[in-house]
């Protein structure tokens, strides 16, 4: 069965949307449910990031990459502030921020013109294809979702049931 580039692009975008809006968000939401506000801002060492910092960082990064670079919205990111924050921003506020950001991302991806997947956009890394931007954003989100799950396991001393 031959697969054309249009169906591959559609599958990639739909898979990206599912991973961000369902899989990763569900895992992070579950971790935030299990942690209290003190746990969310805990860090093993001053040089480490807390769950709160990672959530802020994910929001800034995915918005910059997808909403701005792909969707054309103005980039308003303050990356150093994402890591400098010491909280406590309540977990309910962090979750609202994450959900709202991922809703913006989903709207951009849902309306993305798939034939443009291999066109270049200029980012802080220079010119890269839309495919590379989206793939990189997914990889980055997955890595940090894993960190959030691991920190949750450390703080709770138990397995985190993600299903």
Image (cartoon, rainbow, N blue to C red):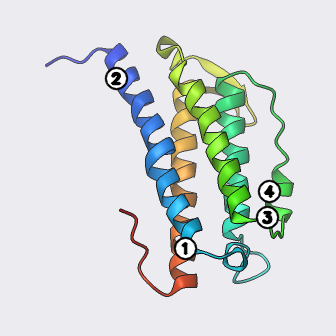
Secondary structure at numbered mark 3:
loop
Q: Nearer the viewer, mark 1 or mark 2?
A: 1
Q: Nearer the viewer, mark 4 or mark 3?
A: 3
Label 4 near label 2: C-beta < 8 Å? no
Label 1 – label 2 distance at C-alpha = 37 Å
Label 1 – label 4 distance at C-alpha = 22 Å
Front one among 145 and 95: 95
Q: In terms of sequence position, does the residue under pointer 4 or pointer 3 come before the other?
A: 4
| In the image: residue 69, left or right of residue 145 | right
For the C terminus, give its image quadrant: bottom left
Q: Position of residue 139 (x, y in %)?
A: 51, 48
Q: In terms of sequence position, does the residue under pointer 1 or pointer 4 come before the other?
A: 1
For the N terminus, give its image quadrant: top left
Residue on which the image places disc 2: 8
Secondary structure at numbered mark 4:
helix
* Residue in the picture at 47% in, 16% down: 114
Residue on which the image places disc 4: 82
* Residue in the picture at 51% in, 23% down: 110
- What mark, if any, has residue 34 been given in the picture? 1
Placement of 121 over or under 25, stated as above or below: above
Quarter of image, res 72 = top right
Secondary structure at numbered mark 1:
helix
Residue on which the image places disc 3: 89
Q: Position of residue 92 (x, y in %)?
A: 69, 60
Q: Nearer the viewer, mark 2 or mark 4?
A: 4
| In the image: residue 113, left or right of residue 78 | left
Front one among 60 and 157: 157
């Amino acid at each position: 069965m031959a697969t054309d580039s249009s169906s591959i692009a559609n599958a990639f975008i739909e898979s990206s949307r599912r991973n961000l809006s369902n899989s990763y968000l569900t895992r992070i939401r579950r971790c935030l449910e299990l942690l209290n506000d003190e746990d969310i801002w805990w860090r093993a060492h001053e040089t480490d990031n807390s769950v709160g910092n990672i959530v802020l960082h994910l929001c800034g990064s995915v918005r910059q990459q997808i909403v701005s670079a792909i969707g054309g919205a103005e980039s308003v990111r303050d990356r150093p502030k994402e890591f400098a924050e010491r909280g406590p921003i309540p977990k309910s506020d962090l979750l609202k921020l994450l959900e709202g950001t991922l809703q913006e991302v989903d709207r951009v991806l849902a309306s993305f013109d798939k034939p443009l997947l291999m066109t270049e956009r200029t980012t802080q890394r220079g010119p890269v294809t839309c495919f590379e931007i989206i793939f990189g954003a997914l990889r980055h989100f997955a890595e940090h979702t894993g960190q959030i799950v691991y920190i949750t396991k450390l703080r709770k001393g138990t397995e985190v049931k993600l299903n």
